[in-house]
Amino acid sequence: MDSVLFDAFNNRNLEKQKTIFATDLEFYHDNGGLTNYNQVIENTRRLFDQNNGLRRTLIPGSLQVYPIKDYGAIETGMHQFCHPENGRDDCGTFKFVHIWQKRVDGWKLTRVISYEH
């Protein structure tokens, strides 16, 4: 599901992202604070509108996934976000935790923790 989520991000497919995030989403960002589903969707829409070439890449070997009994899974890892600036890539590498819930309608991302910015 990580690759599905960020394929949608890298391809600016907000409609697909809306189907992956749970409507009761809580997104914790060490610099930005706590946001909910509607705020995340609006923030993402504004980011996509900037059209600055921002891309997300998973750091190889960093992804770990652990089951949560009768709920879903915990995913941890590191990813890099890059965008072109002055003819070269400007990149940052950050840590994340995703909590996924297995629902009747598929896997939904219910909690995101993004940190070490």
Image (cartoon, rainbow, N blue to C red):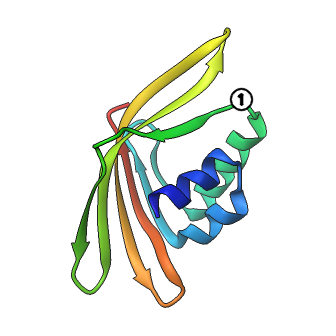
Q: Nearer the viewer, residue 33 or 18?
A: 18
**x and y, in percent, of residue 87 in the image:** 67, 10
Q: What residue is at 62 percent from the left and 61 percent from the top?
A: 17
Kindly state the secondary structure of the residue where label 1 is placed.
loop
Q: Is residue 95 above or below residue 106?
A: above
**x and y, in percent, of residue 88 in the image:** 61, 13
The residue furthest front is: 60
Q: Is residue 72 above or below residue 42?
A: below
Q: What residue is at 51 percent from the left and 33 percent from the top?
A: 81
Q: Is residue 95 left or right of residue 108?
A: left
Say which quadrant the C terminus sits in: top left
Q: Quadrant of residue 49?
A: top right
Q: Which residue is mark 1?
A: 52
Q: Is residue 34 left or right of residue 18?
A: left
Q: Nearer the viewer, residue 39 or 113?
A: 113
Label 1 crowd bin: few (<14), some (14–19), many (20+), radius 10 Å: few
The residue furthest top is: 86
Q: Is residue 19 above or below residue 84?
A: below
Q: Quadrant of residue 2?
A: bottom left
**x and y, in percent, of residue 52 in the image:** 71, 29
Q: Is residue 54 above or below residue 71?
A: above
Q: Hey, what amino acid is under mark 1?
A: Asn
**x and y, in percent, of residue 80 in the image:** 45, 34
Q: What residue is at 72 percent from the left and 43 percent from the top?
A: 48
Q: How many marks?
A: 1
Q: What residue is at 59 percent from the left and 52 percent from the top?
A: 7
